[in-house]
Amino acid sequence: MSDKLPEQGPGGDMPLIAHLTELRSRLLRIIVIWLLIFAGLFYFANDLYTFISEPLRVYLPEGTSMIATDVASPFLTPFKLALISALFLAMPFVLHQIWGFIAPGLYKHEKRIALPLLASSIILFYAGMAFAYYAVFPLVFGFFTSVAPEGVTVMTDINNYLDFVMTLFLAFGLAFEIPVATVLLVLAGVVDVAKLKQIRPYVIIGCFVIGMLLTPPDVISQTMLAVPMWLLYEVGILASGLLKPVNREAESQDDSPGA
């Protein structure tokens, strides 16, 4: 499939049908790449689950293991993990296709800023997932398994565990996008750095509220999400202080979308 854009109409604007055709083409590419990566991962689906469950299994009491309460879980759960993992791995390509779709409508100044932000968003998303796996999971699972009442054996269902960790992966991945979101708001002129500093106390409270809503009902994971969100907000403020919001009126005088 070619990356060439459909021909533009009069005035440099693409007609609606051309936009829809281009969108369909890019969605198909995303689906194809996603399925190709999934096909490569499926053979290793059980190994992937072994890796993803390691933070819990090391804390299970001796002689116990994870369990599958549904008949099809031993097959469907690794299958689902491989499918989700393929989407995560395809994310750079997905974002590249999104960029290719919206880039013709951006000004030159916006393009120069958008590419670093795109790369940063990918890196930060993966960093959030890595932070969850290596820093949060050991603390959370160590705590959960240590507070089980006497006579209760911890034997977690494999599907419930996968849903649990994927929720945390998504929560931390999105939370680590805060610096990018902050910079975008400043560049768009929605807020300025002074305002970001002024609302800092409310943001800190909001971080803990979001941590409470997005993570399981335990203080450890809530705090482990809220504190990095606050620190990343501070990083966003520092980065925004180095940039200037876009003056769209001045920009439009010597530039045009898609130039």
Image: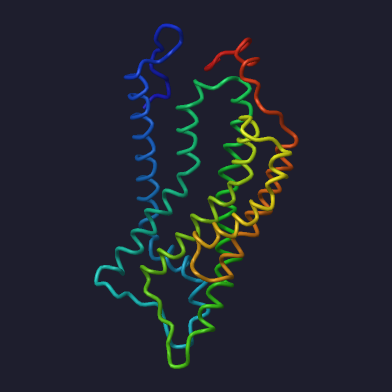
Q: Nearer the viewer, residue 213 or 136?
A: 213
Question: At x 47% / y 44%, what residue is drawn?
Answer: 91
Q: Nearer the viewer, residue 176 or 191?
A: 191
Position of the C terminus by quadrant: top right
Q: Return the x and y of residue 18 as percentages of the image width and height.
A: 35, 19
Position of the N terminus by quadrant: top left
Q: Nearer the viewer, residue 7 or 152?
A: 152
> With respect to residue 32, does 230 lie above or below?
below
The quarter holding residue 225 reads bottom right
Q: Residue furthest top?
A: 10
Q: Nearer the viewer, residue 168 or 209?
A: 209
Q: Return the x and y of residue 149 as percentages of the image width and height.
A: 47, 89
Q: Return the x and y of residue 79 as percentages of the image width and height.
A: 33, 59
Question: At x 65% / y 15%, what residue is drawn?
Answer: 250
Tell me how the rendering is colored. rainbow
Question: At x 25% / y 68%, what residue is drawn?
Answer: 72
Q: Return the x and y of residue 101 as percentages of the image width and height.
A: 45, 27
> With respect to residue 114, does 202 lie above or below?
below
The quarter holding residue 28 reads top left
Horizontal arrangement in the rendering, residue 127 relative to residue 61 (left or right): right
Question: At x 62% / y 10%, what residue is drawn?
Answer: 253
Question: How many numbered marks does the figure carry?
Answer: 0
